[in-house]
Image (spheres, grey):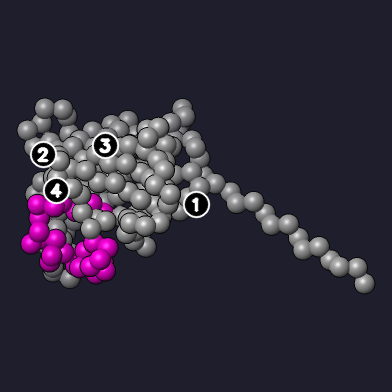
Amino acid sequence: MAAQTPPATTPSQTVGPFYALPGGIVWPDGPELVREGDPAAVIVRGRLTDGAGQPVPDGVIEIWQADARGRFDHPADPRPESSGWQGFGRCATDADGRFWFRTVKPGPLPAPDGAVEAPHLDVTVLARGMLNRAVTRIYFPDEESANAADPVLSAVDERRRGTLIAAASGADYHFDIRLQGEDETVFFAV
């Protein structure tokens, strides 16, 4: 009886790169949630890297956040008054994996169980080779007591929480996203 050759494996399929192409998923307002010159504006800058620390040049970073009072313009926000705040931005990474957003620092917001979540940005990462989005959060370093009480951040292993906290850079913030490897950013299953 002749030896049988095992079937060849099917190559993996990847997503993209298609983000900056006409008709791609570029957001018209891009990374600017507030206009330049807004007195409450902060800039959040960062870099998207792979497991080897190399830049991911064709990724997309999205943020969704509450306004400065911790309110969303969304039907699921249980508070009666609407903020009118869109709170969404999208930025394609550049050749060095860099991204940025001009926004406002969000306020704390209620959690479903009556707790209070610390000010944070919800983040989605999309990139070539990823069949599913990766979801994380950006917390602020100047919110130590709120961060300590945040139910989501408190559920993360204490040794890994630092991957979710931005660094202060003057009046602005810096937050790198590492997709794999040592110092991988904590991602959430949602």
Q: For marks 1 and 2, give the CA distance.
A: 36 Å
Are dots 2 and 4 in contact, CB under 8 Å? no
- Camera-near label (2 vs 3) is 2
Circle 1 residue: 131
Which residue bears the numbered disc 3?
100
Residue 1's place in the image compared with 131, above or below, is below
Are the residues tagged 3 and 1 within 8 Å (C-beta)?
A: no
Q: Residues within 10 Å of mark 4 (few under 14, many from 20)?
A: many
Q: Which residues are magenta?
A: 137-161
> Which of pointers 2 and 3 lies earlier in the amino acid sequence?
3
> Residue 32: x, y in percent?
23, 33
- Tell me which amino acid carries mark 3: Trp
Q: Nearer the viewer, residue 11 or 35?
A: 11
- Residue 46 in which image quadrant: top left
Q: Would residue 25 be seen by someone viewing this image from the given angle? A: no
Mark closer to the chain start, 1 or 4: 4
Relative depth, front residue between 76 and 125:
125
Label 1 vs label 4: CA separation? 30 Å
**In the picture shown, does residue 97 fall above or below 11?**
above
Relative to residue 103, is residue 144 depicted above or below? below
Q: Is residue 53 visible?
A: yes
Q: Nearer the viewer, mark 3 or mark 1?
A: 3
Q: Residue 112: which quarter of the image?
A: bottom left
**C-alpha separation, residue under disc 3 versus residue under disc 1:** 24 Å
Q: Is residue 57 magenta?
A: no
Disc 1 on helix, strand or loop? Answer: loop
Question: Residue 141's spot in the image, x, y percent?
Answer: 13, 52
**Mark 2: few/some/many CA within 10 Å (<14, 14-19, 20+):** few
Residue at 24% from the left image edge and 39% from the top image edge: 45
User: Which of the labelled discs sits on residue 170, or is there none?
Assistant: 2
Q: Quadrant of residue 98?
A: top left
